[in-house]
Image (spheres, rainbow, N blue to C red):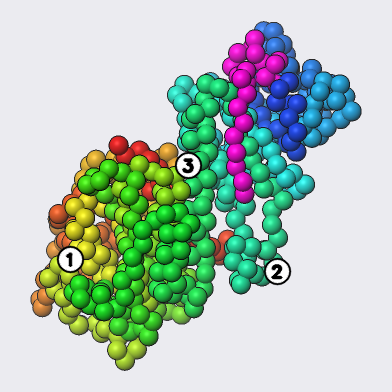
Amino acid sequence: MQFSTKIFSQADLRSSKLLKSSLSTLLSQNTDCLVLAYAKTDLDDFSGGKAAKVKSGLLSELDRLLGGSITHANVVGDLDHQQASTCILRAEKSWAASGVKAKRVLLVGLGDLSLANACNLHAYSKIAKAALKNLSGGSIQNAIWFTPSFSLGHQADFLAEEVRLTIQYAGDQAYRFGIRQPAMKFKAKDKADPFTQLTFAGNEACAKDLKAAVAEGMAIVEGMNLAKDLGNLPPNICTPTYLGKAAQGLTKKAGLKVEVLGLKQIQALGMGSFLSVAKGSDTPPQFIVMRHQGGKAGEAPIVLVGKGITFDTGGISLKPGEAMDEMKYDMCGAASVIGTMYATALMKLKKNVIGIVPTCENMPSGAATRPGDIVKSMSGQTIEILNTDAEGRLILCDALTYVERFKPQAVIDVATLTGACVIALGHVHSGLFSEDEGLVNALTKAGKASLDTVWRLPLDAAYHEQLKSNFADVANIGGRPAGSVTAACFLSRFTEKYKWAHLDIAGTAWKSGAAKGSTGRPVPLLVNYLLEQK
C-alpha cells in the first residue's frame, strides 16, 4: 500500500465562499475515487429538512457539479444521515460537462455533529473503516481522501491522529501474509487487494502537519507489518537466530545499529535466569540490542524490552496440546519492539531509543530446567522456579537488569506474559503496570490517540507476598489469584533503578479462530508514545 499527499491552495469546505472552487478542483483530479465526508446538516440542507436555510452546502454544490447525481441518490434512498453510512456515485456523461475527471465519488456520513462525542477518534475510526471497506476488493486502485471534509465538526485539531489511524486501517486491510512471505504462500488468501494507492488531500494551512502525519502513519504501518510477519511465521522458521538476523537486516534498511549476543556472551553476563529457560532447547538463545541514535549525544534513551519466546511448550510444566500452535505468538513482544524500532528509524525520530530482545525457545528435554530448581539472575537475586511455564518473566528479568547500563529515561517492557491478563481484560486493552504516574499518563494518552489502548492494573505491595519462597529470594509464580499482577510484581523487583512500565499484551497481540493472526499491537501505541516525548 502506498500513501502520498496533495495540497490545494483553496481546498477548504468550511468556507462557503471557497466551496465551489474547492470541489471543482478536487473533481478535476484523475482518480478512481474521490472520498468526501458529509454531515447530517449537509443532508438536511440538501433535502430541505428542518435545519435547511439556503441550499449552498456541500451536497447541494456537489449536486450542481455532478449534474444531479446527488438528487438521484437521495431520491432512491442511497443517502443516509447515519454515522459511517456510505454512498458511491459512478461517473456519468453529465459529469464531463463540469470538467469532472474522477471516476467515482464516495460519500461518507459523519452523522449528527451536534451530538456529544460525535467527533471523537472512536467515531472517526468507525467512519474511516466504512470508507476504506468500500475502496477495497473491487476495481478501485487509487483514491483521493479529502481530509478537511472529515474535520468539519471538530472543536480541536485531530488531523495527525486521524490521518495516522486512516493509514493504519488501510495497512491492516491491505496486509496479506502469503504475499509478503512467498515461501509461506497458500492459495486461499494470497490474492492482492487491487486498492494500492491512497492520497490525502488538504489545504495549505494544514500542509506541513498533513505531510508529517502521512510519513508517521506510513512508518507505523511498516512497523506493524514487520511485527505481523514475525509473529505469523511458523516457529521452525522464526527461531531466535532468525529474529537476530531480522533485526540485523534493519541496519541496511533503516540505519539502526544492531548487536546480537550469542550463548557465550550471555553466559559471560551472568544471565542465569534467561539461560535457565534456553537450556531445554537445541536452538541457541540470542540477545538482541538495537539502537536508534536520533537525539543528542549523552541524552538518556527510552528503552523498549520485548519478550522473545519463539515457541513455548511450557517446558517440563508442559502445556495442554490444544491450541499449542498459537504459542508461536509468544514472541509478539519481541516482534512489536523490533517493529517499533523499525518505525522509529524510518521516521528519523529525534530521540535516542534502544530496543532489547532476549529470545529463546522454551522446550522440554533432559537438559531442561525442572520445577524446584533455583537459578541466579544477573541482578544476583535467586529465583525458585515453581513452574517452567512462567518463563517469560525469567528472560525479561535479566534483560531489565542489563538495561541499567544505559541510565535510561524510561523503560517499557512488552510481553505476552499471562493468560490471566486475557481473563481480566479480554482482547480490547493491553494490561499496563507501573508505579510512575507520568509514564502511566503518557502511555494511556498514546493508547487513546492510536486506539491501541491500555488499562492500568495494580502493583500493590501486598501482592508481593504471593511470591515468597522458603529457599530463594523470590519464586517465579504466586499461584492462580491475580496471576498477571504477581507476574508484574516479579518484574518490578528488577527495575528499581529507573522509571518502568510493563505491558501485558497476551490478549491483544494476536487473534484466534477464523481471523487467526498477529495484530501488530502495540506498535501504534509505542510509536505514538515516542512521538509525544519531548
Q: Is residue 20 magenta?
A: yes
Coordinates of residue 315 in the picture (x, y in percent): 34, 81
Binning the other alpha carbons within 10 Å of mark 1 as few (below 14), some (14 to 19) or many (20 upward) gives many
Residue at image point 42% right, 54% down: 255
Disc 3 residue type (three-letter): Glu
Residue 504, by quadrant, is bottom left
Mark 2 surroundings: few (<14), some (14-19) or many (≥20) residues within 10 A = few
Q: Which residue is mark 3?
A: 216
Quarter of the image with the C terminus is top left
Residue drawn at x 67%, y 7% as measured from the top left: 53
Q: CA distance from mark 1 to mark 2?
A: 50 Å
Residue type marked 2: Lys
Magenta residues (range): 1-23
Q: Which residue is mark 1?
A: 466
What amino acid is found at the position of numbered circle 1 in the picture? Gln
Residue 38 can be seen in this image: yes
Q: Disc 2 designates what residue?
A: 187
Q: Looking at the image, tell me whether mark 1 or mark 3 is earlier in sequence order.
A: 3
Mark 3 element type: helix
